[in-house]
């Protein structure tokens, strides 16, 4: 396929996809392969057996069966990817570690981790499996949880960035690269709850219009900066006021190929790693969700996602 060029720096590092034999993992691998192909980066397929932690409780014969099954699945998945993306560099990795640790290790410091929204071990009502949630909550690299049916639904030509304010420029650049690689438009969407400002020291009810104008101004500043850096990218802004930020963002994913959010990583790993809005997207979005770690000035003010 023809690979588009990108402005500024490109997204580097391998794309890492976990496999476990589930339908969801298969969809995630194919999404990851398409992503790696767009980026012109290698794809690394990882099977995590978890046998390292069970060596004292299982026989050598059982461990060998697990290894054989894992290698067979890696071979089968690699063949599927090669058939669809013959020019893509694919590496296959069997790990004895638990899935979250194996995926984080494979990604290193510059990879992107891609997982399905549920694995073979989850109950049907658990909309996000423990592996997906564990990786999304603690990874220091971008993580994509593949939701919806990417192979079945037509492309929208839109990437959504769920933005808080102008301080999000750092991680929103990643969303801009994702949009540019897809030749899609980037939609900066911010949702704020007017009721959250009422009765505070900052404002009274009659200041709500002023707060709304401030949000619109901040989005305009952010969009102008991105347009200057990505001159061929269409960037639009939308400021919505409503009681449920999560509900409005989930609804917006009906009209997107990818939604990107910034993730707060609490100091020393203490505190909430995924806010309720991001958690809602991971459970209910209608398209893949990418979580990009915030760094530097992106961490101020306190994350609301």
Image (spheres, rainbow, N blue to C red):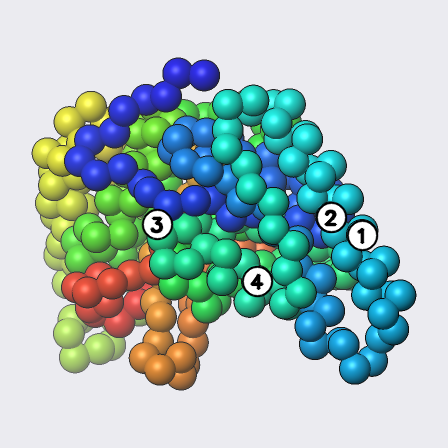
The reply to whether dot 2 and dot 1 touch (C-beta < 8 Å) is yes
**Visible residue check, residue 214:** yes
Report the mark closest to the observer, 3 or 4: 4
Report the mark closest to the observer, 3 or 1: 1
Give the Cα separation between the discs numbered 4 and 1.
18 Å
Q: Which mark is residue 68?
A: 1
The reply to whether dot 2 and dot 4 touch (C-beta < 8 Å) is no
| Residue denoted by label 4 | 102
Q: Secondary structure at mark 2?
A: helix
At x 43%, y 71%, the residue is 273
At x 17%, y 64%, the residue is 297
Residue 183 vertical position relative to residue 31 in the rendered view, above or below? above
Report the mark closest to the observer, 2 or 4: 2
Residue 59 is situated, as x and y percent measured from the top left of the image, at 87, 73
Report the mark closest to the observer, 3 or 2: 2
Report the mark closest to the observer, 4 or 1: 1
How crowded pointer 4 is (Cα within 10 Å; few <14, some 14-19, many 20+) is rated as many
Q: Is residue 50 left or right of residue 182?
A: right
| Residue denoted by label 2 | 71
**Visible residue check, residue 149:** no
């Amino acid at each position: 396929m023809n690979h588009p060029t990108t402005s500024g720096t490109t997204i580097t590092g391998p794309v890492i996809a976990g496999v476990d034999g589930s339908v969801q993992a298969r969809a995630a691998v194919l999404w990851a392969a398409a992503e790696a192909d767009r980026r012109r980066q290698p794809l690394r397929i990882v099977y995590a057996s978890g046998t390292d932690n069970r060596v004292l409780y299982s026989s050598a014969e059982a461990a060998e069966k697990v290894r054989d099954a894992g290698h067979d699945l890696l071979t089968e998945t690699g063949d599927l990817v090669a058939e669809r993306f013959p020019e893509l560099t694919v590496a296959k990795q069997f790990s004895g570690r638990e899935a979250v640790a194996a995926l984080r290790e494979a990604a290193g410091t510059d990879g992107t981790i891609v997982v399905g929204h549920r694995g073979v071990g989850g109950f049907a009502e658990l909309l996000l499996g423990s592996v997906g949630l564990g990786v999304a909550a603690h990874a220091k690299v971008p993580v994509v949880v593949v939701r919806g049916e990417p192979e079945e639904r037509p492309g929208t030509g839109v990437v959504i960035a769920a933005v808080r304010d102008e301080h999000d420029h750092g991680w929103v650049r990643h969303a801009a690269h994702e949009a540019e690689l897809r030749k899609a438009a980037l939609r900066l969407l911010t949702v704020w709850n007017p009721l959250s400002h009422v009765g505070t020291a900052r404002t009274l009810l009659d200041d709500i219009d002023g707060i709304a104008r401030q949000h619109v101004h901040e989005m305009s500043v952010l969009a102008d900066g991105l347009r200057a850096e990505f001159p061929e990218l269409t960037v639009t802004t939308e400021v919505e006021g409503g009681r449920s930020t999560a509900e409005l963002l989930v609804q917006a994913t009906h009209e997107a190929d990818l939604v990107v959010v910034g993730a707060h990583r609490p100091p020393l790993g203490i505190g909430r790693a995924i806010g309720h809005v991001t958690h809602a997207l991971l459970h209910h979005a209608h398209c893949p969700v990418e979580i990009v770690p915030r760094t530097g000035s992106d961490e101020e003010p306190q994350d609301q996602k």
